[in-house]
Amino acid sequence: MTNSGHEQIEKAFLTGEANVALEGLDAHAHPLYAMLKAKVLSGEMNASEMGDAIIDYAVREQAKRSAA
């Protein structure tokens, strides 16, 4: 990944984190977010894969709540 590409990704994360904070939430408080962000920044995963992982997690969590 080029330096400007990495900078663009970091800027996108900062923007997303600011938007989440406006909703009163803290993305950094969730260990899954930190792990996925690190994978994207290291090039192990792309943003689309991160989105898929977040959706998978949300679906699993909803299923757990529904089953309880």
Image: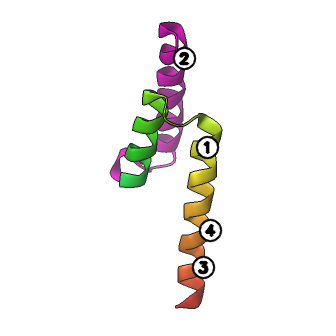
Given the image, on which type of amino acid does mark 3 rest? Ala
Residue drawn 54% across the image and 26% down it:
12
Q: Position of residue 11 (x, y in %)?
A: 50, 21
User: Mark 3 highlights which residue?
Assistant: 63
Magenta residues, start to end:
1-30
Q: Where residue 8 is drawn, which disc sits there?
A: 2
Vertically, is 63 above or below 19? below
Mark 1 packing: few (<14 Cα in 10 Å), some, or many (20+)? Answer: few
Residue drawn 44% across the image and 50% down it:
25
User: Mark 4 highlights which residue?
Assistant: 59
- Which residue appears farthest toward the front when viewing the image? 44
User: Mark 1 highlights which residue?
Assistant: 49
Is the C-beta separation of discs 1 and 2 under 8 Å?
Answer: no
Separation (CA) of disc 1 from disc 2: 17 Å
Is the C-beta separation of discs 2 and 3 under 8 Å?
Answer: no
Was residue 7 drawn as part of the magenta stretch in this picture?
Answer: yes
**Mark 1 or mark 3, earlier in chain:** 1
Tell which of 59 and 49 is nearer to you.
Answer: 49
Mark 4 packing: few (<14 Cα in 10 Å), some, or many (20+)? Answer: few
Given the image, on which type of amino acid does mark 4 rest? Val
Separation (CA) of disc 1 from disc 3: 21 Å
Which numbered disc, 1 or 4, marks the residue closer to the eye?
Answer: 1
Q: Main secondary structure of the magenta part?
A: helix
